[in-house]
């Protein structure tokens, strides 16, 4: 039986921290489904299609190196339902610090009640990525700062192009 993991998030934009979690998760599962959450009340910087393409392009070499499979999907409801839809029995979550831990442990309890078949695995952020957040990347980019230390080059190009379009 294949081990299928679900890594949910908005990935707007995908950061080096996300890639670090993806790389490490691929050593734990046979197939990692990166699930982009869609919220009708939020307007993301990048389109869903752009996020799919960037994740697939950046994660494919990591999957190949790990001998695993990676795919993308989107979801708009509960993460535990998205895990069921993907056939996943593991939800992968990255933790940057204590605040993330507090929130995520509460979610684990709620998710376990809703779907006890799905386990959650926390991957602590690597020291070199623990301070990176998509929100800060968007803010830095919108103020003309250099985001290349925080995101892959392909992502930086797409983010900067989108910000230029909006001005």
Image: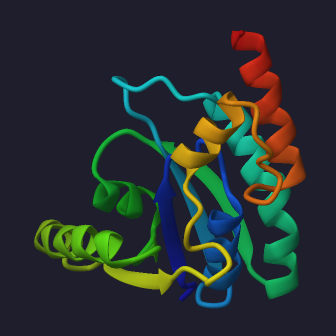
Where is residue 106 shown, x and y percent of the image?
17, 71
Q: Residue at x 73, y 72 (%)?
A: 69
Against 80, residue 92 (above or below) is: below
Compared with 55, 121 (above or below) is below
- Count how many numbered circles sit on residues in the image: 0
Locate residue 63: give its quadrant: bottom right
Q: Residue at x 86, y 77 (%)?
A: 64
Q: Indicate the quadrant where residue 159 lies.
A: top right
- Where is residue 93 shown, x and y percent of the image? 44, 72
Q: Quadrant of the N terminus?
A: bottom right
Residue 102 sits in quarter: bottom left
> In the shown orientation, is residue 66 left or right of residue 71?
right
Q: Position of residue 98 (x, y in %)?
A: 32, 78
* Residue at image point 40% right, 26% down: 42
Q: Residue at x 47, y 58 (%)?
A: 8
Colour style of the rendered protein structure: rainbow
Residue 2: horizontal and vertical position, in percent?
A: 57, 84
Q: Which quarter of the image is occupied by the C terminus?
A: top right
């Amino acid at each position: 039986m294949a081990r299928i993991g679900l890594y949910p998030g908005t990935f707007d934009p995908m950061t080096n921290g996300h890639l670090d979690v993806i790389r490490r998760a691929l050593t734990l599962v046979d197939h990692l489904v990166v699930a982009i959450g869609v919220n009708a009340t939020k307007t993301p910087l990048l389109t869903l299609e752009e996020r799919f393409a960037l994740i697939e392009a950046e994660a494919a070499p990591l999957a190949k190196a790990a001998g695993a499979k990676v795919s993308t999907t989107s979801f708009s409801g509960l993460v535990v339902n998205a895990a069921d839809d993907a056939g996943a029995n593991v939800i992968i979550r990255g933790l940057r610090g204590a605040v993330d831990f507090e929130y995520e442990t509460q979610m684990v309890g709620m998710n376990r009640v809703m779907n006890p078949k799905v386990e959650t695995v926390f991957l602590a952020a690597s020291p070199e990525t623990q301070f990176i957040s998509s929100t800060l990347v968007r803010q830095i980019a919108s103020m003309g700062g250099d985001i290349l230390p925080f995101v892959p080059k392909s992502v930086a190009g797409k983010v900067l192009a989108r910000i230029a379009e909006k001005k």
